[in-house]
Image: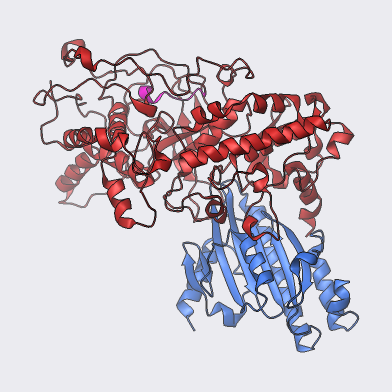
Amino acid sequence: MNASVTESAQALFDGEQLPFPPVPAPLAALLQPQGPGWFATRPVASSPYDFDRFVGEVETEPALPGYAVVGFDGHGSNSWAVHFYLVDTALALFVQLPWGGAYVDAGPARADIVDVFDWAAALQARLRTAEATGRIPPGTRLQVAASRFSHAGWRWLDAGQDATATPWNPAAGMKAAMLLELDELIAGRRTTAAARC
Amino acid sequence: MSTIGRGSGLDRLLRKLDTAVGGAARTPRNPERANSGGLQTPTSPDSPLKRRNAISRPGGMAGRNVALAALRMLGGAKRPQEPSLPNPWGLPDPAGMPAHAVGGLPSPPLTPPHTPPRMPWTPTGPTAMPMPMPMPWAQPAQRPAVPPKPPELQQPPLQMPQAPTLPNPLDRPAHWKQPAPQGFAQRPAAVPARQADAYPIQVKVPQGQQKLFRKEQREATSVPKLARNIDRLYKQLNLKVTADTLPAFTNAQVLEKPKQLGAGAFNTVFSVKLKNPDGTPFDGVFKPLGAVEKGWVAAATGIPKDDPQIAMRNIATVSYAKKLGLDVVPSTRMAVLDTGRGVVDPDLGLIMEKARGRPASQVEASLLRRPDVCAEVTKLQLLDHLTGQGDRHANNYFINIEPDGRAKVMGIDNDQCFGKNLKDPAGIQQMDHDRLRYGFRGTGLPPVVDTEMARAINAMTSRDIRAMLGNKLSEPEIQAAIERHEGVKNHIAQLRATGHIIDPSQWGQGDVQRLLNGQNSYLGRERDRAMAKNHW
């Protein structure tokens, strides 16, 4: 348990008057500073701003152990974002939202971040329930890309499945769509296999 | 005549730099920076020793020019009077910059009397830029006598590399004849008188330490200290000294203390109100520069991590846009400003026009169908293909409808570009499943361009590109730019063959609009997102 580092990470978000991302406690305890404004539970080759690298990594290495990345990264005047990446047994979530840019309007940007983090917490809670009830087969992950700089969408991926051949569900309405889908999984009205059809 | 002693810091600096001007500047070790007129690029980024040696070496013209620039800012050096050239961007002529905030200090002559007569400064190499140099401190009676130049050493005055007095007849109307971008004066007016800092340092000095403080304060604001600090900043960034990179603004032009912009304490960008040489205020954005680049796009395109030359990439982008008549990036110059650490410890960074309007990520889809918006955004997209800009996302370009009703597009953060490895203009396209394209956020080449865009791009030659970028980028980076330009010209030829070169008045037509999608155009991409983004 590295409480001081975790507190530092939380203090970083407190300083921005932002909520801390919903990182599961076991992973939060493993956070280590990796850059001036970001933390990760493992060494990573690229910085969080390189969103696509993280999304691509989990596709090419499905056995990648769970990890989390939180913090702020970017370049230039307005290419700055808050990042929350979480890879767990049933979830590969990548959130990148504008924050820290010279032209970012703090109020709406903060509201957007709060909203997405709240949703991410709700998503994890449902996934835990679905896993506990055996509704999510081993090796199956819900992959979510939520970047306002790169791309957004979601899909289910099985271990060994060709990610390039698996289309993304559209970004429009995706938050509600995922929660609804998990509710149906938990209720037994749907399976992940059916969800991919 | 001399007001500076033999052992003074500036004098030592100048003599040290002068002794190193020859070999170091003319025989760069790194062939990729062979056209550099300034500091040497380390021979190998993997060699800290070489890097340290290369950077610590006085740096030939770079060091000398930085020191001279510092002197000129202080009003203490004089260049030979030569005819001034029009300033295409209406920005302050570095030679005409007012004195820095060291009010009351005597201005040193360039040549102390006890040293052997030195040749009057003559611009040489790619950094040369004939500029008038006011010498407000010197009364005629006090002016140091300049020894006559031996005939064998006399050189004809060199021309600025991109002489704007020789327009290409195939070009569009010269950009420098067009009105200056809002916020910048068309042409520097009279040099304002020397003035103190716009915001004096507020320091409470404990009892008994006033004498020590006064000593430190004198040292901090002394000419040698400032010259050393400016020189150090350029060396830290390994920034070549050219007419484009000399600081156009210093604390003397600051009207309001820089304020940190935007949300977040980890990004250092400042809003600063500055004074143009004609006295008119304008709102600028100041971004201090760092010496390291960590972006994946930069790495993938061959931008050196430890020597990214961010300033040069931004300035090169502005030059490219200007040459093509694409008014889609903000005017950008260098500045040395105090951002809070005191006059003695300023930041060297980029000062640019503040972008107006809203980022493309926040505009309504309907705006993205306006004909003039379509034309302007396509211009930015073409510029990005030409410069190899790999990180054009919807938060780093802005769309504004100006008071006169015209659409104005402004792309910022132009630093992930001109990589030597990116030779295909379509290589900036985001490809989700291509590992080599991870991090790129652009699109494919546009499916339609108008006749003005096509004419401007086709009229440009590889010689133009070389002349435009020669003193800013390395040879492989210039070669890659030439190849991207060829690629765009080939694409335009294909569009012409298929009837997709349109008149500028046709951007609003439905069949033209339907050609634009998320894979081939920023407009299509932003329309898709505008429809989905607010409804995650």
Residue B363 locus on image (x, y percent): 74, 43
User: On the picture, is B24 further left or further right than B419?
Assistant: left
The correct choice, above or below, for B62 with respect to A95 in the image is: above
Report if residue B284 is visible in the image: no
User: On the picture, is B327 further left or further right than B503?
Assistant: left
Our reading of the magenta stretch's main secondary structure is loop
Chain A visual colour = blue
Residue B300 image-quadrant placement:
bottom right
Q: Can residue B321 be found in the magenta stretch? A: no
Quarter that holds the C terminus of chain A: bottom right
Please tell me which residue is depicted at 75% across the width and 39% down the height of the picture. B446
Residue B313 locus on image (x, y percent): 50, 40
Chain B visual colour = red
Please tell me which residue is depicted at 70% across the width and 70% down the height of the picture. A120
User: On the picture, is B201 further left or further right than A32?
Assistant: left
The correct choice, above or below, for B421 with respect to B4 in the image is: below
Report if residue A178 is visible in the image: yes
Residue A149 locus on image (x, y percent): 66, 53
Counting labels gives 0
Please name whichever residue, B109 or B461, is drawn nearer the observer in this view of the structure. Answer: B461
Residue B179 image-quadrant placement:
top right
Q: How is the image coloured?
A: by chain
Please name whichever residue, A72 or B314, is drawn nearer the observer in this view of the structure. Answer: B314
Please name whichever residue, B351 or B111, is drawn nearer the observer in this view of the structure. Answer: B111
Provide the residue span drawn in magenta.
B89-96
Residue B139 locus on image (x, y percent): 21, 13
Q: Can residue B95 be found in the magenta stretch? A: yes
Q: Which residue is farthest left?
A: B114
